[in-house]
Image (cartoon, helix red, strand yellow):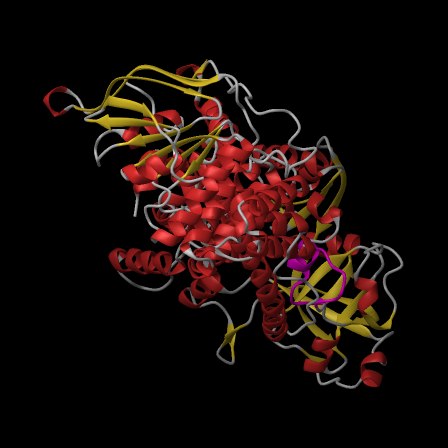
Amino acid sequence: MRTRDILGEASAALTGSRSRTCLTGAGVTVGALALVLIVSLSLGLSTLIDDFVSGEEQLRHVLVMPGFGRRIDRSVEIEIAGEMTDAKRDRLRRALMKRSRGGPPMQAAINTIDADVEAKLAAISGVVDARPFVQDRFEAQLGDRSTGNRKVLSIGAPADHPNYPGRLLAGRWFASDDEHAVVVHELMLYELGIASDEAQAAVVGKTLRVTARKEGGGMLAMIMKATGGSSGGGKTQWPVLYSEDLEIVGVIRERFGDDPSTVMDEAMAMQADLFIPTEFHRTLSERRAGQGGLRALLLVADSMDHIDAIEDEVRAMGLQSRSVQRAVSRIKKTLDVATFVAGFLAAIAVFVSCLGIVNTMVMSVLERTREIGLLKALGARSRDVMLLFLVEGAFIGFGGGLLGVAIARGLGVFGNRVGTSMIEEAMQMPFTGTLFQFPLWLLLGGVGFATATSLIASVIPAIRAARIDPVRALRHE
Amino acid sequence: MAAKELRRQGPKADPVSNVGSHHGGMRLVEIRGLVRRYGEGHAAVEALADVDLSIEAGEFVALLGRSGSGKSTLLNLLSGLDSPTAGSVRIGGEDLAGLDPDGLAHYRSTQIGIVFQSFHLLPGRTALANVEMPLVLDGEPREERRDRAAAALAAVGLSDRVSHRPSELSGGEQQRVAIARALVRDPALLVCDEPTGNLDSTTADGVTELLLTLNRERGVTIVLVTHDEALARRCASRIVVLEDGRIVREEATERVMS
């Protein structure tokens, strides 16, 4: 038989039993629909992650932080003052230890990022830049307005930072990394009672006094209370380490969704109210005794391929490392696993629909036994008969798959609208991404997969049809 | 191995004139020591036992016998639908036992035309599509097979029923469509299994007359299986009587119909 005739005969047979063909095809449609939707959502989410860390440079960032070793038992250092028995003193000490829950105060950065380590990190093969991250907390005073006991976060920011200057509301950005200046956040000014744009712009050129006090809070606060440390008004007053007057050169606003940024910068700058030139900030931090070097150092690799090697070397130095690339990789792996599991469930749906095809084709063979016998009596070869049934199965798969992909495409449009609306509402920012993505390969692959699985499901019925004995078949009623 | 072509050349050039064209002047069918046994051991049933039969091209042979006499089994073996337990069936000198399944399919497609008692037309197809089917199976181009199918329908007097489906045709017309389908490939041999068994006497006469015409005027070699001796005597030039799987009598006849 000619290919065209086989296609025509198969098509005629399917249209001859429309209801059954439609029902069987519906099963394939549901399977293909589920599979394509799941893959399209996975693709969309994956792209969203990529877009979130847009810019190849971010994927070359490795954030290095001090390495924390094993927990240090500092209980022996805690002095419990007052007249009491040794048992009570020990019990109070242990109670303090217990309430600390083993948090950071109980751990010491045994591997800090001092100047030597910083130099070594910068010299790691593949590292093209090393940007120190400096952070501190100060009390801020502007004229007679003060943040009081609330300490504001300051960060060191480079003069050539690519993103921060774009968020300035007034004034200017730093001229150099060692400039004796500060850029303040509009929110801090608001909290100081300076609300309007004009009033906030007017602070440019004025002096902000920052006051550093000895580290406090958490465990040490409890210890201070327990040991009778100085307090005032019910609140602990920590000893002043130093104060510094800085010229306010600019006012900056918060970063929002559309603003350019890098993950690492934003992680460090989150909640920052004061932006101080990096090198000058380092000199301030060094005045804090026991600071122990940098809070973090951002290494920029020359290539994403070197990230793993750089991270290995950083960890070998006893330091912690974080990289966007690794984080993205982990998220994507998790997404892949979720997609695989969901895809597996969808594949079960396709498999079940294949059982439907097997059932339909077997019934069709039984019902058409006499017709098959006649075709064989008229000269049909076994492979012609087999091809007929295979093509019928493939047609069901193709039609069902095509419909499934088309419906998935339609649902994807709907899902994108709903998803966009939900994301914008949740994140309070415009969202231009696409949750459900339908590249051509997915559309073709969805139809192809449905067709192929249906074809496979038709093999056994087709073989049964091909083996029909024409003499018996022609007697079949 | 493909079956040897026994048709005369030229059907594509003139499809109408070649429907059922004459193949006279040679021994077309030669059956020797044919045995067909079903089952094994004590349960074995011998449907045909040591049958020898020769048929000349252009003959009209009636296989006569009661139900279970083995005539349909002989027809199935002759048609290449069944394989013998022993013995041989030679068509145009070629042993069917030497053909592989594809060769047998080709043989059925090109050398044999089969007419069934219950017509066996495809219900959803038109008369033309039914007649076309053997040509479709043989991979004939669409235009040529349309012409040949239309010519075959014209040859059985159904030019005006080309687009009718079987359900729209009378029993006699359906059997004529089946005969046209059997003849469309211009086969060497037309085998008819009780072709009038499902028809009333008037319609049956028409079909019988058609078979006679095809045999006489176009020289189509016909093997007619029937249990109706009167029918056999009316149209066959030779009667072969089967009983319990054996040929018990052969006789030449003076055809009653003319």
**Residue A372 quadrant:** top left
**The stretch drawn in magenta includes residue A260:** yes
**Residue A41 quadrant:** bottom right
Identity of the residue drawn at 69% across and 63% down: A154
- Find residue A296 and report its horizontal and vertical position in percent: 65, 49
In-front residue for pair B37/A55: B37
The N terminus of chain A is located in which quarter?
A: top right
The magenta span reads A257-273
- Find residue B238 and report its horizontal and vertical position in percent: 36, 27
Identity of the residue drawn at 85% across and 54% down: A160
Identity of the residue drawn at 75% across and 85% down: A195
Q: Is residue B35 above or below residue A334?
A: above
In-front residue for pair A331/A294: A331
Q: Disc count in the image?
A: 0
In-front residue for pair A307/B3: B3
Q: Is residue A179 visible?
A: yes
- Find residue A61 and report its horizontal and vertical position in percent: 69, 45
A277 to the left or right of A466: right
In-front residue for pair A141/A326: A326
**The stretch drawn in magenta includes residue A171:** no
- Find residue B15 and report its horizontal and vertical position in percent: 64, 37
Q: Residue furthest left?
A: B42
A420 to the left or right of A465: right
Identity of the residue drawn at 75% across and 47% down: A57
Q: Is residue A347 visible?
A: no
Q: Is residue A332 above or below residue A122?
A: below
